[in-house]
Amino acid sequence: MRSVIRSLIRPLIRGTIVGLLGTAGLLTSAAAASAQVVQSLNLSIGAFMPRGEESRVKNDVWLQDVSVYRMEVRDFTSADLSGEWNLAFNKHLEVGLGGAFSQRTVPTFYRDYTNADGSEIRSNFKLRQVPLTGVVRFLPIGDATSFQPYIGAGVAVIKWDYSEVGDFIDFNDNMNVYHAQYTANGVSTGPVILAGFRAPINGDIFAVTFEGRWQRAQGDLNTNDFLGSKIDLGATSLRAGVLIRF
């Protein structure tokens, strides 16, 4: 009986030991692989520059507004604050997850109409964007201790808010001037293309960065509130920053 029990238990013990050793090997390999991943944080400041009139989407609200109000699309150029967490799997390939914030309020008034007393009929148009992005970078030459140019692409998920607040003319009611607040918001997605470079500062821990990004996206507006049915969120962003590796 004892020999039978031993014959049953020994294979079970061997199998358990082999399984534990295999699991330990996998965990060791995973730890070694994770040790090769270099993490970094990039903090940047720059400029958000919306697409020009010649390249904006059809029925864009600003294309309609510029013929009625004293404003230009370039008036919505704003500061751009961003941060990104990067994971470098080797010196040539990296993924990044980041977020940014930009906001601009443009004061404006009608081009061809005034109040009865001759004063301007004024409003404020405001766009705020908070894009969350996932990107992949390819760094063809150099490493953390040298100058590294790169290119990349990804996708942006943009939380946006747009408003037009102030005094407006009701062209269907004897040109009556009234005060109102029109708002719209949404979440839009679109592609991102980027290019830039990094230059180390006394080693491989710190680096200065410069990057250009091109994003394409658009949001929907209610034509009962706005002159256009779309808002073009496409833009170019230029960013300068500091990168810290961990």
Image (cartoon, helix red, strand yellow):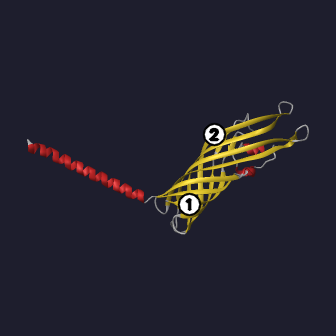
Q: Which mark is residue 123?
A: none
Pick the quarter of the image with the N terminus.
Answer: top left
In the displayed structure, does residue 104 sit left or right of residue 215? right
Q: Is residue 98 above or below residue 110?
A: below
Residue displayed at 77% across by 35% down = 180
Report the mark closest to the observer, 1 or 2: 1
Residue 239 screen position, x and y as percent: 63, 58
Mark 2: secondary structure: strand
Which residue ends up furthest to the right in the rendered image? 117
Is residue 49 in view?
no
**Tag 1: residue type?**
Leu
Per the rendering, the mark at residue 186 is: 2
| Residue 118 picture location, percent across and down | 91, 41
Residue in the image at 76% along x and 39% along y: 165
| Residue drawn at 74 percent across, 36 percent down | 181
Above or below residue 105? Residue 37 is: below
Which residue does the numbered mark 1 point to in the structure image?
243
Q: Residues within 10 Å of mark 1 (few under 14, many from 20)?
A: many
Asked if residue 96 can be seen in this view, the reply is yes
Amino acid under disc 2: Gly
Question: Residue 63 at what x, y percent from top left?
Answer: 75, 45
